[in-house]
Image: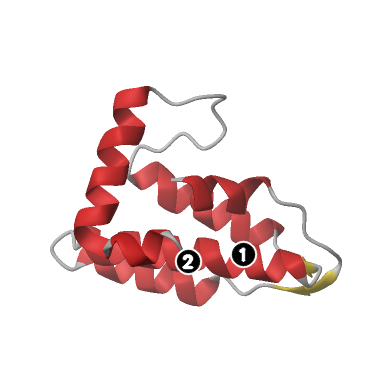
Amino acid sequence: MGKIKDAVILSGGDGKALDSASAWALFSNAMEDDLDSPEAQRVLVSFANEIIEASKVDRDIRQAQEVVRRMSSVFGLRLEAESPEGAVIQKWDQHLKKFLGAEQLTK
């Protein structure tokens, strides 16, 4: 969950806004496809990584961060909380490793 939380607390710049429409469409389609949670989680993590990269080149990431918050809320993630319950973090990490593989979490 670290990268996802990082993506919503970073500061961006005044550059071209990061497009969030395609990420939201992919996420929505995955959830509508018989609740394809693993694919929706891949989209969420991938988009969080895009936000992190966009912030490094001073792009405007505010709208994209809002989209990540909405995606995260579907899974019950409280990104603004000071510290989620330990059991939540542990289970979320186990779930991500199962569906994404450990190599995706280190990118």
Residue 96 in sight from this viewpoint = yes
Q: Few, some or many C-alpha atoms within 10 Å of disc 2 (few <14, some 14-19, many ≥20)? A: few
Q: Is mark 1 on a helix, strand or loop?
A: helix
Give percent across and percent down for residue 107: 47, 66
Residue 91 versus residue 17 in the image, above or below: above
Residue nearest the observer in this picture, 5 or 76: 5
Three-letter code for the amino acid on which mark 1 is drawn: Ile
SS at mark 2 in the image: loop
What numbered label is drawn on residue 107?
2
Q: Distance between the residues labelled 1 and 2?
A: 13 Å
Please provide percent x and percent y for residue 65: 61, 55
Labelled disc at residue 32 = none
Q: Please name the residue that numbered disc 1 is placed on.
A: 51
The residue located at (52%, 37%) in the rendering is 79
Task: Check contact, mark 1 vs mark 2: CB within 8 A.
Answer: no
First along the sequence among labels 1 and 2: 1
At which x and y percent is residue 10? 70, 51
